[in-house]
Image: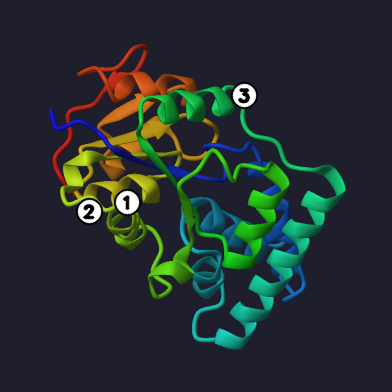
């Protein structure tokens, strides 16, 4: 196996445990556009939000408000304000063992890229709150690759170029959504690990192309150095 020299880690739900905070911000955003709790339209919109985990937030709203770019943009702006406001009020914390996993990756001289569907502004607020500048080589959002986020492979391939690598097999991906898995497989990463942290189910992660399933980020460093990883379930999948 080609040694892994770069890992691309998802942000929300994978390295930080903010799924509920993110979903509340989505709910608040769509409510400002007339879709309120207790209605069928609200239930359908939140199902779409869940299915679209990992995608750029603006693309999520474009799916909820098809053909109405102004409404999608307005909802996205509300989402950003609501989420960043929640961070200011309650703070933001990494998932248990995330800091230790990052330390292990750095000690192994593996470059670490954080990738997200948040905007550059929101990503900046998250990184400033976490104080992770020394733990990461870089952090990327859709604005860094012409607006195309997951499930497209652009974020991962952009990370590969910024890391100065030439072989996609030197890349490993960790995320908690089917869209993370699709992006990793489409980019050609040698390891695409799905994490069971409350995002998508094991079945959806496997359907997306996961090569490994882990319970937590603590198991991820071992996956890079072993065929099946320590405590990780290896999945035989075909390329997506």
Instruction: Report how far apart the C-alphas of labels 2 and 3 lie in the structure.
Output: 29 Å
Residue 137 versus residue 116: which sits nearer the camera?
137
Q: CA distance from mark 1 to mark 2?
A: 19 Å
SS at badge 3: loop
SS of the residue under disc 1: loop
**Residue 40 sits above or below residue 178 on the image:** below
Instruction: Please state which of the two labelled residues, at mark 2 or mark 3, is closer to the viewer.
Output: 3
Residue on which disc 2 sits: 186
Q: Which residue: 73% across, 57% down? A: 83
Which quadrant holds residue 181? top left
What crowding class fits label 1: few (fewer than 14 Cα within 10 Å), some (14-19), or many (20 or more)?
some
Q: How many other residues sit within 10 Å of disc 3, few (<14), some (14-19) or many (≥20)?
A: some
Sequence-first disc among 2 and 3 = 3
Judging from the image, what secondary structure is the residue with disc 2 in?
helix
Residue 110 position, x and y percent, is 35, 34
Disc 2 to disc 3: CB gap under 8 Å: no
Q: Is residue 43 visible?
A: yes
Label 3 close to label 1 by CB (< 8 Å): no
Q: Image quadrant of residue 150?
A: bottom left
- Judged by depth in the image, the label closer to the viewer, 3 or 1, is 1
* 63 in relation to 113, above or below: below
The numbered mark, 1 or 2, whose residue comes first in the sequence reads 1
Residue that appears at 79% across and 43% down: 91
What residue is at 64 percent from the left and 71 percent from the top?
Answer: 76
Residue 163, position as x, y percentages in the image: 32, 51
Q: Which residue is mark 1?
A: 163
Residue identifier under label 3:
96
Q: Nearer the viewer, mark 1 or mark 2?
A: 1
Mark 3 or mark 1, earlier in chain: 3
Residue at position x 60%, y 58% in the image: 123
Above/below status of 18 relative to 28: above
Residue 216 visible? The answer is: no
């Amino acid at each position: 196996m080609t040694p892994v020299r770069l890992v691309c880690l998802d942000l929300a739900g994978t390295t930080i445990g903010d799924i509920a905070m993110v979903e509340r911000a989505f709910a608040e955003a769509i409510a400002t556009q007339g879709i309120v709790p207790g209605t069928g339209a609200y239930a359908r919109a939140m199902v779409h939000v869940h299915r679209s985990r990992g995608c750029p937030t603006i693309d999520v709203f474009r799916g909820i408000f098809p053909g109405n770019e102004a409404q999608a943009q307005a909802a996205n702006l509300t989402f950003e304000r609501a989420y960043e406001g929640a961070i200011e009020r309650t703070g933001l914390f990494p998932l248990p063992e995330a800091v230790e996993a990052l330390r292990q990756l750095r000690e192994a001289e593996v470059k670490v890229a954080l990738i997200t569907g948040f905007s550059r502004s929101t990503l900046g607020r998250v990184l400033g709150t976490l104080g992770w500048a020394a733990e990461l080589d870089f952090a990327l959002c859709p604005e860094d690759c012409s607006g195309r986020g997951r499930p497209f492979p652009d974020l991962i391939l952009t990370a590969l170029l910024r890391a100065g690598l030439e072989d996609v097999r030197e890349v490993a991906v960790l995320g908690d959504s089917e869209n993370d898995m699709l992006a990793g497989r489409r980019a050609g990463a040698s390891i695409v690990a799905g994490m069971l942290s409350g995002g998508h189910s094991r079945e959806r992660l496997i359907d997306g192309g996961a090569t490994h399933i882990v319970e937590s980020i603590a198991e991820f460093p071992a996956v890079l150095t072993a065929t099946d990883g320590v405590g990780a379930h290896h999945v035989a999948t075909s390329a997506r």
